[in-house]
Amino acid sequence: MPKVSELILSAKKGNRRDIGKLISIIENRSDGYSDLLRRIKRRTKNTYVVGVTGPPGVGKSSLISRLAAEFSKKEKLAIIMIDATSPFSGGSLLGNRLRLESTDNIYVRSMATRGSSGGLNLALGDSLDLLSYLGFTMTLVESVGTGQDETDILHYSDKILMVLSPGLGDEVQALKAGQMEIGDFIVLNKSDRPDAIIAEKELMETISIPDLSKKHSLAKVSALTGEGIRELVELVNSTRYDKNIGDFQLSREKERIKREIVEILKTKEDVIERYAKEVIKERINRKQAVSKVLRLLQN
């Protein structure tokens, strides 16, 4: 396999295969991973990350296809589609990926969660840094969207689209406790359907709650017909340089540090077990065990 420096040079020239190889190095933490991280961490991050989340079946992938066609007119665009199982499974996801990849100005990557909580792959943060380093000015991230606890996308995105559709009913009420709060824009997809008027009324009632109404905008679109897509793009772009972006960056970096600690701890399972046995035998207490593990992590 070529050296990381050679892959980076090729990737900067737009070689999609080598961009994929670099992301695979990050995902697998294989040879060259540390060298790659050192290189990409030196540059200022300037990619605008827009997360797209929502329950299954609301048309996130189709919506992203429409948004990509608009954003790519002015942006060097990357798209990361998070899949709950395999990077290449799922008919609709793969179909959308193939359609998107026919455009020269767009790079598309499917990424498996590999069992990580929150619906996002642990390698996502480093992959976003890589894409920024390679000159991508915008990245759309589609999360798995398997339930209201899938809110980790908050820690990776500058802005978030919460995508919903007519017919969700009680599911909208359940979302109040989880996903609904993290969205910057509530997007009602499939607005061409007859029951979209009822869904719009329900959503307006939901986001009229004081804590939600302060931060939410409702956009009606149809990924099928293209209705409202251009207006949604303008809405997302209009808040690109909000002063609150710094808060998102801080939150994102804190979460990534926590995740790195968790990953390191997974490699020290034998050490943790040893000290756990010491605690059970009452030779040390739990606080002392934690201190000993932390000291080992520093070495």
Image (tube, rainbow, N blue to C red):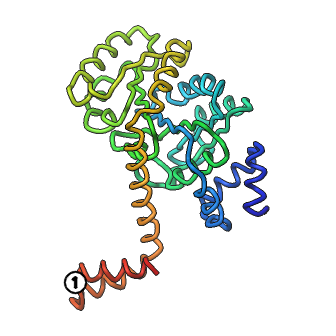
Residue 294 screen position, x and y as percent: 36, 77
Give me the residue at 59% from left, 35% from top: 93
Residue lying at the far bottom in this picture: please name it: 283
Q: Quadrant of residue 13?
A: top right
Give me the residue at 30% from left, 27% from top: 172
Considering the numbered disc 1 on the image, is that residue within a helix, a strand or a loop?
Answer: loop
The correct choice, above or below, for 49 with respect to 189 in the image is below
Give me the residue at 36% from left, 22% from top: 217
Q: Mark 1, residues whose alpha carbon is within 10 Å: few (<14), some, or many (≥20)?
A: some
The correct choice, above or below, for 26 with respect to 251 in the image is below
Q: Amino acid at mark 1?
A: Asn
Side of 103 relative to 262 (left or right): right
Give me the residue at 33% from left, 84% from top: 275
Residue corresponding to mark 1: 285
Residue 231 screen position, x and y as percent: 49, 16
Q: Nearer the viewer, residue 161 or 215?
A: 215
Q: Quadrant of residue 201?
A: top left
Side of 213 relative to 85 (left or right): left
Side of 206 relative to 192 (left or right): left
Q: How many marks do you count on the picture?
A: 1
Residue 235 screen position, x and y as percent: 46, 21
Image quadrant for the N terminus? bottom right
The correct choice, above or below, for 7 with respect to 76 in the image is below
Residue 90 screen position, x and y as percent: 58, 38
